[in-house]
Amino acid sequence: ADSAGDGCEWYERNDLPGCPKHGNTYVGDMGVANDNCCHCVDEDSVSLTLNPTLSPTLSPTYSSTSDSSPSASCTGNTPDWVDVDGYGCDWYETYDFPGCPNFGDEYEGAMGVASDNCCYCID
């Protein structure tokens, strides 16, 4: 747990993968979330091992279902739209479900939220 008493689940619900907003903020007895939570580990800093484990480990995956698609009334993403952290519609297509139920109304940038700017996020 961090200094506020929150565990990794809090970061999964309240921060983007890699935890750019809060991952280094609250130091607990074992350090910060970026050093202890799978959701917060920066993919660029992960090193691969040549010795695989004998049993698989579970980690969250993000995928879209082929039968879910954006509304037919959507005519394209808002050109040059990015959220407050600089992520564009492609990030939401990779890390959220169709309609963007997890992040579509979060991280409002100068041009609004993904739910108002990305076809993938419009119900």
Image: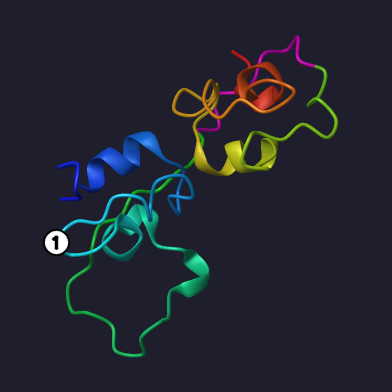
Q: Which amino acid type is shown beneath numbered disc 1?
A: Asp
Residues shaded magenta: 65-74
Please report the residue visible at 54 percent of the width from the left and 24 percent of the height from the top: 104
On screen, residue 116 above or below 8: above
Check disc 1 and report the residue beneath it: 29
Q: How many marks?
A: 1
Please report the residue visible at 24 percent of the width from the left and 48 percent of the height from the top: 8
Q: Is residue 22 left or right of residue 58?
A: right
On screen, residue 12 above or below 120: below
Please report the residue visible at 73 percent of the width from the left and 12 percent of the height from the top: 72
Q: Is residue 70 left or right of residue 43?
A: right
* 12 in the magenta segment: no
Could you say where residue 19 lies in the image, as x and y percent from the top left? 43, 50
Q: Quadrant of the C terminus?
A: top right
Q: Nearest the camera: 13 or 120?
A: 13
Could you say where residue 81 lies in the image, as x and y percent from the top left? 77, 31
Q: Quadrant of residue 54?
A: bottom left
Specify how the rendered protein is coloured. rainbow
Could you say where residue 111 lies in the image, as x and y percent from the top left? 74, 22
Name of the residue lying farthest toward the right = 79
